[in-house]
Amino acid sequence: MKKRIFVAVDLSEEIQLKVAQYIEELRQAFSNLKVGWERKEKLHLTLKFLGEIELKKVKWLEKVVSDVARDFTPFTIEISGTGFFGSKSYPRVLWLGVSDNSGCLERLQKILDLECQKVGFKSENRDFKAHLTIGRIRQPELASELLQEHLRRGFLGGEFQVSEVVIYESQLLREGSRYSIVSKHKLNQSF
């Protein structure tokens, strides 16, 4: 049996609420467009997507994530700024930026990726760019006004402390994906 797995950092409740409000404002302003908007409970920062993996490998992953998490103390990041993937005439994904002044989030992701390779997981094939996906555009050819509004508004959600790393299972259902927590791994509080 296999599970679809990814490793992430959760947002604070306060930031989740601000992002959800921002998404709702865009959703209402552009209700005529087909956009897969992220739901509040699914907002997270992906560190590593592993895809379909065997159940026994989930245990390996839990050990790796636990060991890596213990090498970090809690750190602060900020959700701010707006951006997109695709082109201005054909935007595919809308996202909010992540400011990681300490560099800890990027280091955490790189070490996690490296340690996962050591136990047989594939390495990421592109550079890590921390971002918070808020919407996947289903009609990119009609979304230039939405993109302009997203970029014009900007976003300043504020800072929050990263104190744990979470392993999630993603189940693909007809009504969309559903995430469930596999395990949580606290960063080292004792440094």
Image: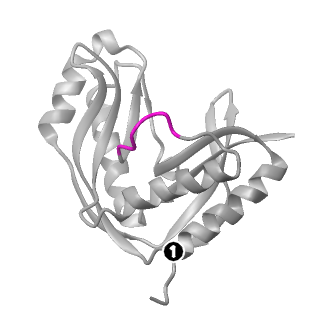
User: Which quarter of the rendered picture does the C terminus lie within?
Assistant: bottom left
Is 181 situated above or below 117?
below
Residue 62: percent from the left, percent from the top?
Answer: 70, 62
The residue stretch that appears in magenta: 124-129
Nearest the camera: 10 or 189? 189
Q: Residue at x 35, y 19 (%)?
A: 33
Q: Residue at x 37, y 45 (%)?
A: 132
Q: Residues within 10 Å of mark 1 (few under 14, many from 20)?
A: few
What type is the residue that disc 1 sits on?
Asp
Residue 48: percent from the left, percent from the top?
Answer: 54, 47
Is 122 situated above or below 88?
below
Name of the residue lying farthest toward the front: 118
Is 158 situated above or below 28?
below
* Secondary structure predominantly adopted by residues drawn in magenta: loop
Which image quadrant is residue 158 in? Answer: bottom left
Nearest the camera: 191 or 174? 191
126 drawn magenta: yes
Q: Residue at x 17, y 30 (%)?
A: 149
